[in-house]
Structures are given as C-alpha cells and as structure tokens.
Image (cartoon, grey):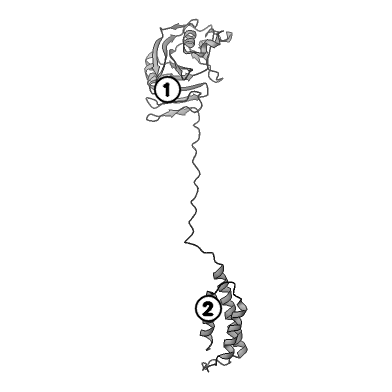
Amino acid sequence: MSTDRDVTRIVRSWLKEDAHEDADRVLNLVLDQLDTTPQRRVVWPVRRILSMSSNVRFGLVAAAIVVAIVVGIGLFNRPSVGGPAASPTPTVAPTVSPTPSIPMKLSTGVRYRTSNFSVPFSFAVPANGWTMDSDTPSGADVSAQGNSFYGLTVMTGISVYKDPCHWDLGYVADLGSLASVDGIVAALGSLPGFTASQPVAVTVAGHAGFAFDLAPPSDASGCTTPGKVRLLDSGDPNNHDEFFVAVALHYQIIDVGGTPVVLEQYSFDGAARLADVQKVVDGITFE
C-alpha cells in the first residue's frame, strides 16, 4: 500500500509533538492523505483470492493509528529516570549474645565480666576448671575444684553476724560501721571463736585497703548448724557465707569509689590453694 510510509511518517511526527496535541487532528490528517494520494496498483500473489476493499484499508490504517497513539501515550507517561534504581540495602538484625547461665564454666585466656554485681569487674582464671557460681548485685563467686573447693567471693553491702557459731542471734549492733573499710576490718577481726592476723595495707586493681587471715574455731559441733559457721551476709538469700570449720580464709577489704568491697578467699584444700585464688585477685580490674 502506497500510504504505509506516509502513515508511519505522520504517526512519528505526532509522537514527537507535545502530549496535549489532539489525536483527532492526526487522524484527520491521515484521512486527507488517503483521499489525495493516488493509489498504485499492487499485484497480489496467486494465492491471494480476496481483494482488499477501501473500507478494509481504512480500518487497518485506523487500527495502526490507534496502536501508535496508545504506544505514544505510554511513552509520554513513562517517568524519567536517571539510571537503574538502587537495590535497597538489606537490614541485618543485630545479633544479641544471651546472658550466660550460672554456674558458668570458665577457661584460660578469656577475660570475664560480672553482669549483675553492683561494682562491676572483669577477671581471668589461672587454669581451666574454674566456675562462676554466682553473679548477683551483692556478690559474685568463682571457684575451682581440687580435692575439694577453693575460690573467691566478692561482696558489697554486707552484714556481720554477732556470733558465727550461733548465727541465729543476728548481726552486730552497729551496722553503720560496716559502711567503711576500717569498720568491716574491725568487725571481722573481733568475731567470737575466730583468730585474725594483723591487718596489712594492700592495693587491689589500684584500690587501697587492708588484708588479713581469719582462722575459724576448731570445733563447731554445738553451733546452730552443727559443724558450720556463718560469718557475714551479703543480702543474697542463696549465699549465707556458711563454711565448715575446716577452711582457710583470707580477706582483702578495699575501697572502690567510696564503696567498701570484700574479697573473701577460701580454700577447703588447705592454705596453699589460696595462692591460686590470689592469681584471680591479681587479674581483677574494676570498671
């Protein structure tokens, strides 16, 4: 058909014009071209039996225009973009480590930190086989097992019993004195039935205080709890600081930012084991 190129040219011309141009104008222009352009005779192949009438030709041209208009509208309505859209960055949920359960096995080469104790500190253990047995606001305890147990309990806000053998008699009368390092040293050093060594000045993790040994009575069979004594109470119902009398005890009482902190070293494996406990104390860092 001789009008194909003209129709294509007209449609392309329309697509280049502004989007507000009336589509009817283009259609009228095409129809004018059909009326004024002489038609060239086309020899159809032998297999083509039916000839194309003018109505059919007009219908095909109109259909082509409609398709072009639809495509043009789609092109004009496409949003202008400067490039491919950036892929959204996936958000990775932070991984939260769970709070270790107590008791917790400890290993060498790792520093551990108390998470609940009121005066937080970090520490390391000198050998595998140590365990963190408690971590509460008033006390934290780490221990190891040899023939029996030995370890370290760190406490604040303590109360001292009047008589460790008869702990049911209550605490010392002047609890206010336990708000200082000197008051705690004096209270523990005067417990009935116990023998305290002369306190010596010490420094633990840069914090000054005093240290001394405390030897329990040889016989506790007549005590409130037969064979056991209670020295002090940290306020933790699960830790009454209760010992069999066959225990070696060493205390270091220090001041950490105005808070008296008790470091109680104990051993049921003999006094020699206190040297291993001291290695834990030597590595403590208060935060």
Along the line of sight, the residue nearer the viewer: 154 or 87: 87
The image position of residue 76, as x and y in percent, is 55, 69
Q: Earlier in the sequence, mark 1 or mark 2?
A: 2
**Residue at 47% across, 13% down:** 181
The image position of residue 129, as x and y in percent, is 41, 26
The image position of residue 163, as x and y in percent, is 53, 7
Q: Is residue 254 above or below residue 71?
A: above
| Residue hosting label 2 | 13
Q: Which mark is residue 231?
A: none
**Residue at 59% across, 87% down:** 32
> Please, what secondary structure does the residue beneath circle 1 have?
strand
Question: Quarter-wise, where is residue 278 in the image?
Answer: top left
Say what amino acid the circle numbered 1 marks: Ala
Question: Quarter-wise, where is residue 213 in the image?
Answer: top left
> Please, what secondary structure does the residue beneath circle 2 have?
helix
Quarter of the rendering occupied by the C terminus: top left
| Residue hosting label 1 | 144
Q: How many numbered discs?
A: 2
Q: Are marks 1 and 2 in contact (CB under 8 Å)?
A: no
Along the line of sight, the residue nearer the viewer: 197 or 11: 11
The image position of residue 260, as x and y in percent, is 48, 16
